[in-house]
Amino acid sequence: MSAEIIYEKKYPHIDPEEERKQLEIELANKPREPIPSVDGVYEKIMTDTAYILIPERIKGSEEFIKMAIEVSRLYELDTRIARHDSHISVTYSFNCCGGMRDIRCVFGMADEFAFFKDIYGFDFTISMDYYTHAVISRGRIIAPDIEFPGLGQTF
């Protein structure tokens, strides 16, 4: 039995070699500016950033961690769970596989996720974030993308 295609869309992709050549031309014509230090960049970002605890998200973060560990054990995934100033991150690294339906529980709880290919010596790495604090930068809520009753989206 063949599959019925319901929707298909292909987008134009830039040839990496052509993109590299274009970037080299742009860089050659651009005046050199001093490269800021990592500490300088971090300090500039942190100057305008504040974190506000979202108390009801703390219990959810505990469940997020518990579920992430359970999925890690179930599928024997290399896992890293870290607590940051604003969120909990779960990173799974693994080689190709299928049938990991229980991972959807962790995806469903995550506020953000990203996929990476061929890093850490694995075919795939998935990183998921669960925010425990609202991240406010320059008076705007940057993350998480949830409603804050009575606060709106700006401070």
Image: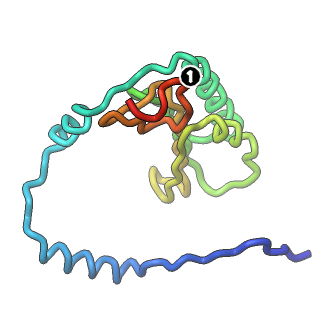
**Residue 87 relative to residue 147: left or right:** left
Q: Is residue 114 above or below residue 18?
A: above
Q: Closer to the camera, 113 or 54? A: 54
| Residue 48 visible in rendering | yes
Q: Position of residue 20 (x, y in %)?
A: 30, 77
How many C-alpha atoms fall within 10 Å of the one at disc 1: few (<14), some, or many (≥20)?
A: some
Q: Identify which residue is drawn at 63% across, 34% down.
A: 109
Q: Is label 1 in a helix, a strand or a loop?
A: helix
The amino acid pointed to by label 1 is Arg
Q: Is residue 101 above or below residue 63?
A: below
Q: Closer to the camera, 100 or 136? A: 136
Q: Identify which residue is drawn at 52% across, 44% down.
A: 127
Q: Identify which residue is drawn at 55% across, 57% down.
A: 123
| Residue 90 visible in rendering | no
Q: Position of residue 55 (x, y in %)?
A: 52, 16
Q: Position of residue 153 (x, y in %)?
A: 46, 35
Q: Quick one: quadrant of the C terminus?
A: top left
Q: Is residue 16 above or below residue 54?
A: below
Q: Is residue 38 above or below residue 35?
A: above
How many numbered marks appear?
1
Q: Position of residue 142 (x, y in %)?
A: 42, 38
Check disc 1 and report the residue beneath it: 57
Q: Identify which residue is drawn at 57% across, 24% down.
A: 61
Q: Closer to the camera, 29 or 80? A: 29
**Residue 133 relative to residue 39: left or right:** right
Quadrant hosting residue 53? top left
